[in-house]
Amino acid sequence: MSFRRRLKGKAPPEGFEMIESAIEDFEMQMKDAVNEEHEGKRKNELTWRIHRIHWEKNRLIYDLMYKRKALSRELYDYLCREKIADQALISKWRKPGFENLCSLLSIQKSATNFGTASICRVPMANRAPQQQLTPNVKTGCISCCSGDGIMGGPIWWNTPITQAVTAKLDKKRKAETKVSEDPEVAKRIAALKKEMMS
């Protein structure tokens, strides 16, 4: 249902005109994503674009409210009450470690087979080589953990993987190998292993 039809007869607070065109644009993108052709796509891939549009719309509202401070509290509460903004997702973004969270589905432990968080929450440098660029099956997010994103956002399935991202990955891997190759640490580990054997 269109957000205009839901809001019919309810006067929005002051400042709604400022974001009305952007919300309309996101609603049209969402409508196109829902009506998108599904031929040749896996069942899960159909929702990936929907999750990305949802993230972008809520990120705009979050940035206006908490970063730029251009949205009034009254308008923000109105957007959340009328289900235009996802209050649960926006409140997660305010917590440390969840600044780039792609969707609440990625931290919902009941949605995975082993009761863990989604693959997109694992830093790319800590993943096995075959899982480096694997998107989350539910959301299409490759990485939304803090530090991996591009310009403060997650890496999505259709985000071009630039040299900056691969350089960041290589830098993290090199730092990890340098730490593990320290000769003094290796000597102490060998001594501890010898003590445990005897």
Image: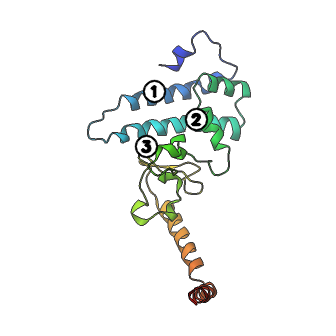
Toward which corner of the image does residue 78 lie, by quadrant?
Answer: top right
Name the residue that disc number 3 marks. 138
Name the residue that disc number 2 marks. 58
Mark positioned earlier in the residue sequence (1 or 3): 1
Q: Is residue 88 above or below residue 117?
A: above
- Please give the name of the residue rendered at 55% of the width and 57% of the height, measured from the top-left corner: 148
Secondary-structure class at tag 3:
loop
User: Outermost residue, top direction?
Assistant: 9
Q: Is residue 179 above or below residue 67?
A: below
Toward which corner of the image does residue 90 lie, by quadrant?
Answer: top right
User: Outermost residue, front direction?
Assistant: 198
Q: Are marks 1 and 3 in contact (CB under 8 Å)?
A: no
Mark positioned earlier in the residue sequence (2 or 3): 2
Amino acid type of disc 2? Asn
Amino acid type of disc 1? Met
- Please give the name of the residue rendered at 51% of the width and 41% of the height, measured from the top-left corner: 105
Secondary-structure class at tag 1:
helix
Name the residue that disc number 1 marks. 28
- Please give the name of the residue rendered at 56% of the width and 88% of the height, measured from the top-left corner: 197
Q: Are marks 1 and 2 in contact (CB under 8 Å)?
A: no
Amino acid type of disc 3? Lys
Mark positioned earlier in the residue sequence (1 or 2): 1
